[in-house]
Image (cartoon, helix red, strand yellow):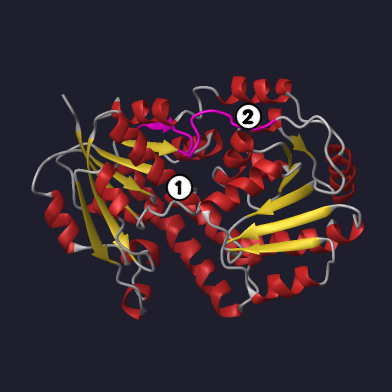
Amino acid sequence: MSKKLHIVSFNVPYPADYGGVIDVFYRLKALHDLGVEVHLHCFSYGRQPADELNRLCASVTYYHRRTGLISALSKRPYIVESRDNADLLANLRRDDAPVLMEGLHCCSLLETLNDRPLLVRAHNVEHEYYARLAAAESNPLRRLYYAEESRRLRRYEAVLMRADVVFAITEADAVHFRNMGCSKVLLMPASHQDNTVVSQPCDAPSADSAYALYHADLSVPENIETVDYLSNNIFGQCPDIHFVVAGRNPSKWVEDSLASHRNVRLVANPNDDSMRRLIQDAQVLMLFTSFPTGLKLKLLNSLYAGRHCLVNSNMVAGTELGRVCTVVDSAQQQLEALKRLMDTPFTQQDIDRRRDLLGDLYSNEANAKILLAEI
């Protein structure tokens, strides 16, 4: 007998082309494969209705997100106020099936619903994430917005104590939600596109074709900050290494910064197949961040499909994934490790170590079953 579940998503989760929506989409797919009757409710802004979602869900309903000044003037966080929707509430009240809210963004429902299991997928400790966005932002107005949103999110976060279960994406986040008093917190790592490690061994890297890759959404301040770091500390120090920087919507600043390095190629807005090929063929994947928040899905994608992963400690914070990465923090250590890994074969033994570590913990099916056990 199938179970019925409402999922409320902060955005349209297809195409699955950036962090949060990747988690949502592959969770939908895993639930569909387990026979769950999913009724998806999603806020549409900048993304179109997707036929692929109709294949995975019993119903898909789209709602307008109320962006603009009125939502910005609310005492609640903007990401919450702009998704408070009377039609959504009315649709949910037609039955008493459990509701999974994707992100604190959708948690205004915790203020009004109380007649069925209420579950929250926490994609981050949001106020910490927005505080770091503020620190990384150079535009004064956007920096002010991020700082104010962080303040509101810190205050609003207490609404999570009304949820029956909060699913944290890392153990570090789980500790945070337990310490704040949430009644039940479970670890449920991110869903992603791979069911098994598909990395390919490489016994003898070719100096002519081997390259190191940085891939990210290149419009996000966190990632622009990383490009700036790589440009200043890595690219120019390794003139004999080929680099590729790939991702969505690179800013003009990113384009200009990378153009000054003859050994760097920018790949803007690659499609899924192209990005997959870039990840699989890279000798080294560079994954640095100044934000020790959440679980970086690009790290999971790289571990499942790529070769050597060179990361800083922030990238693997709150996880065990550092055991199958090269973790270094100073620029000098990163340069030394990069040069070494570019000449180091990636072997079947490396692949087997990944499979042993990732195992059930990062299995989409296993994590979907964790969710189902609570409804």
| Residue 269 placement, left or right of 16 | right
Q: Is residue 151 above or below residue 39?
A: below
Q: Residues within 10 Å of mark 2 (few under 14, many from 20)?
A: few
- Residue at (40% x, 51% y) in the render: 157
Q: Which residues are magenta?
A: 182-200
Residue at position x 54%, y 55% from top? 129
Disc 2 from disc 1: Cα separation = 21 Å
- The amino acid beneath tag 2 is Glu
Against 227, is 323 above or below? above
Q: Picture coordinates of residue 300 (x, y %)? A: 58, 38
Residue 320, disc: 2
Q: From this viewpoint, is residue 255 visible?
A: yes
Cβ atoms under marks 2 and 1 closer than 8 Å: no
Counting from the top left corner in percent of width and height, residue 50 is at 31, 57
Label count reads: 2
**In the image: residue 106, left or right of residue 5:** right
Q: Secondary structure at mark 2?
A: loop
Mark 2 or 1 closer to N-term?
1
In the rendered image, residue 173, in percent from the top left (x then y), is placed at 51, 40
